[in-house]
Image (spheres, rainbow, N blue to C red):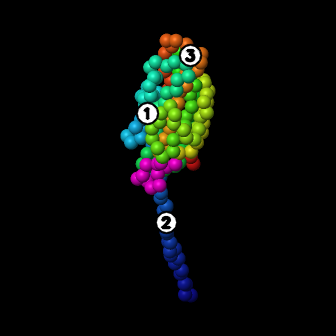
Amino acid sequence: MLGVGTMATLASWNDSEFASATFTAGRFVFQGSLNGTDYSDHAVSGSAASLSFTAPVGNLTPNDVVAAPFAIRLGAGTTNDATITVGAPVTVDTVTNLTWELIDTGASFGCTSTTTGTSVVAASAFTGGSATFTLPKGATSDADGTAKNLCFKIRAGAGLVQSQSGSAVWQFQAVSQQ
């Protein structure tokens, strides 16, 4: 009898697929300027940009109005627009019978007590007032965003107390839009 033996060989088919990705976080640069040209970071109240108000900021009398320019923008490399919120200042010492307002001066940097423009924050006591607005990123990744030129106006009220002295710090809070 003839026996037939079978030998089975299993062919091994083997294949793989791999997938990979690189994850890079966006960038967010928020800057301020006291002259409309030189921008830098003032990220904590202890290093706040020191506004230069017009005279007679050191010798206020009732109904005086003083003004100071300030510009903000998103710096180059910023990957998202921002929502900006500005509110009532934090004050130190005596700051009473004064009101503040914030005006958008458009494409022009600088302001005086008579500067007009679009109201960002209407005249408010130092304990109030706020606004929220959008600030655009640059048109390309290596371009700065368009600056928002602002004018702080401070008015001394009729009840201004002689010899009072105090300071105020405003915070512009920038939040990246998704």
> Is 11 in front, or is 141?
141
Which residue is under mark 3? 160
Residue that appears at 45% across and 23% down? 56
> Is 171 in front, or is 114?
114
Amino acid bearing label 2:
Ser
By secondary structure, the bulk of the magenta-drawn segment is best described as loop
The magenta segment is: 136-146
- Residue 97: horizontal and vertical position, in percent? 58, 19
- Residue 103: horizontal and vertical position, in percent? 55, 37
Can residue 71 be seen in this snapshot?
yes
Which residue is under mark 1? 42
Residue that appears at 45% across and 28% down? 53
Can residue 70 be seen in this snapshot?
no
CA distance separating discs 2 and 1? 52 Å
CA distance separating discs 3 and 1? 31 Å
Mark 1 crowd level (few <14, some 14–19, many ≥20, 10 Å Cα) = some
Amino acid bearing label 3:
Leu
Which residue is under mark 2? 16
> Is 65 in front, or is 153?
65
Image quadrant in which you'd find residue 34: top left
- Residue 140: horizontal and vertical position, in percent? 45, 55
| Label 3 SS | loop
| Label 1 SS | loop
Which is nearer the N-term, disc 2 or disc 1? 2
Mark 3 crowd level (few <14, some 14–19, many ≥20, 10 Å Cα) = some
Amino acid bearing label 1:
His
- Residue 85: horizontal and vertical position, in percent? 57, 37
Q: Are marks 2 and 1 in contact (CB under 8 Å)?
A: no
Residue that appears at 53% across and 30% down? 153
